[in-house]
Image (cartoon, grey):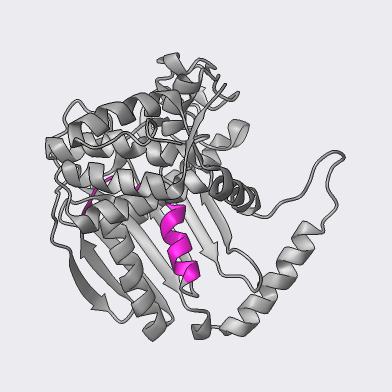
Amino acid sequence: MNTARLSLEDLRAFSEVVLQAAGANAESAAAATKAMLHGSLLRVDSHGIRLLPHYDMVLRGGRVNCAPTLQFEQLRAGSGLLDGGHGHGALATYAAVDHACDLARAAGIGAVGVRNSSHFGPAGAYALAMAEAGLIGLVMCNSDSFVRLHDGAERFHGTNPLAMAVPTLHGDPWLFDMATSAVPYNRIQLNKSLGREMPEGTASDVAGVNTLDPHLVEMLAPVGGAFGFKGAGLAGMIEVFSALLTGMKFSAEILPMGGPDVSTHREMGAFVIGIDPDGFIGRDVLLAGMDRYLGALRGSAPREGTRVLAPGDREWAEAARRRTHGVPIDPDTAEAFARLAQAAQIANPLETQT
């Protein structure tokens, strides 16, 4: 399939103008765009620029506050709560990252619970921001119910992502980013657009029976296949951090991401943890240890015809390709770009390529 591609620069400019045309202030537009482009660059396309039409819709509908006032309250030496003012989740979470890093540099560990937030996109974007600042970052968030329990036949948990990033001595950070569902929710929409089947054992129909047809998917399976109780348990752990410790809604209480109500705030929580290695063994020792660990990991004997990779290796390789060749735009997103450009009264970047 001949897929259109756009540069990161073109996508960034288009996204920020579209979001501001929808009412978002410059800070919200920049944060949301930064998070989406993280997804698009690292081939987390389900949480990349294809989210732009959704964000445009919820900003215009009033679900997401276009110009929120963020409020941070430090409650202990290394902990606090950040109120996102019902604004875009990326704005609140990047702010929480900054506070967690500040707390960690003072106390060794900094933990910030995020309240009154919304969909924040790829969790790895925020963990990576902490690794780039020299800290170990851990980020998680619950979301509206779309994942059945192990042996369950109804939606219960959200996809409840978890991400961790660690700085390294050479090259890009070690980056682990996963949904606790077998695949992310947005993978369904992407597969519909691309005409692809769902991977085996990842999604279920209305009766909880596995299906490959993305058009029949009613719920996702927890990660783990036959051992899906592990994925369900991880999702529950994230509920504790993101909902209980922040006083926000459980997955089953959060309004569905896809509507039909796009005017009511979703009251979502998230949790950010920053760890300063100088509060433990020290940055230099950590970096040397990561170098030794990753060398051993990548040098481990692979199965025949395969290659052993560290978390993030595949994504960083794809990022290098996309910086050179551009970000692929799936057909549904390409159609949405035309509508967004018209609404914002700007040129469609897909039509102005040379």
Q: Is residue 136 visible?
A: no
Q: In this picture, is 171 found above or below 278?
A: above
Locate the N terminus and report the quarter of the image it occupies. top right
Q: Nearer the viewer, residue 277 or 349?
A: 349
Q: Position of residue 285 (x, y in %)?
A: 64, 82
Query: Considering only vertical position in the picture, is 337 above or below 194?
Result: below
Foreground residue, 299 or 239?
299
Tell how many labels: 0
Q: Residue furthest front?
A: 354
Tell me which corner region of the image, top left, top right, bottom left or bottom right, holds residue 245. bottom left
- Residue 226 in the image: state x and y as whole percent: 61, 31
Q: Position of residue 321 (x, y in %)?
A: 61, 46
Relative to 285, 96 lies left or right: left
Instruction: Give the camera-side residue of 319 and 114.
Output: 319
Is 338 positioned to the left or the right of 266 in the image? right
Does the magenta segment cover residue 189? no
Seen at 17% across and 51% down, the residue is: 86
Question: As drawn, is 201 to the left or to the right of 70?
Answer: right
Is residue 119 rendered magenta in the image? yes
| Residue pictured at 25% horizontal, 32% vertical | 340
User: Looking at the rendering, which quadrant does residue 156 occupy?
Assistant: top left
Residue at 36% in and 49% down: 12
Position of 130 relative to 240 (above/below): below
Q: Position of residue 279 (x, y in %)?
A: 49, 84
Magenta segment: 116-132
Q: Quadrant of residue 10?
A: top left
Question: Does the image show residue 197?
Answer: yes
User: Going 33% across and 62% down the picture, which residue do you hit?
Assistant: 94
Compared across the picture, whether 60 is left or right of 127 comes to: left
Nearer to the camera, 315 or 175: 315
